[in-house]
């Protein structure tokens, strides 16, 4: 079982369209831990920790997002050090 951590910066119409809630539900349904938050520059930042293949599936789904969103890009960096989150949360 390969544990991994991905740090995402999501661009496009991703604020005010339920993107954070979508990401939280997605992560919980896939058994991933981490967090998501809005940034001042209108992007959304997220961290997923869990099985690498499951994180890759989450990233694919994040490219679509909720119906009102329009994702124009996702910058993903894979990080070595896990923080060991127990669950997934929306940060404010």
Image (cartoon, rainbow, N blue to C red):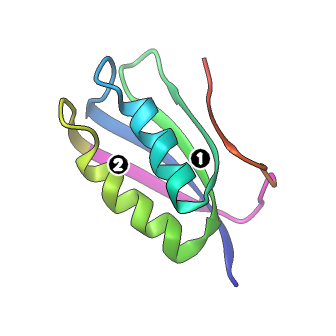
Q: Which residue is mark 1?
A: 47
92 in the magenta segment: no
**Res 1 → quadrant:** bottom right
Measured from the top left, where is residue 5 in percent x and y? 64, 61
Could you tell me which secondary element the residue under label 2 belongs to?
strand
Q: Does 42 sit left or right of 69 as displayed?
A: right
The label on residue 74 is: 2
The residue at 77%/49% (across/down) is 85
The residue at 23%/40% (across/down) is 71
Q: Does 33 sit left or right of 37 as displayed?
A: right
Please count the marks in the image: 2
Quick check: 16 above or below 71?
above
| Residue at the bottom extreme of this rendering | 1
Measured from the top left, where is residue 75 in percent x and y? 40, 50
For marks 2 and 1, give the CA distance. Answer: 12 Å
Magenta residues span: 73-83
Please state which of the two labelled residues, at mark 2 or mark 1, is closer to the viewer: 1
Q: Are circles 2 and 1 on residues that touch, CB within 8 Å? A: no
């Amino acid at each position: 079982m390969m544990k991994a951590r991905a740090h995402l910066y999501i661009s496009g119409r991703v604020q005010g369209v339920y993107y954070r809630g979508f990401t939280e539900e997605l992560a919980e349904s896939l058994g991933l831990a981490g967090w998501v938050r809005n940034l001042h520059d209108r992007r959304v930042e997220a961290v997923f920790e869990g099985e690498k293949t499951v994180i890759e599936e989450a990233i694919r789904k994040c490219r679509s997002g909720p119906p009102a969103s329009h994702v124009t890009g996702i910058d993903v960096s894979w990080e070595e050090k896990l923080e060991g989150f127990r669950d997934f949360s929306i940060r404010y």
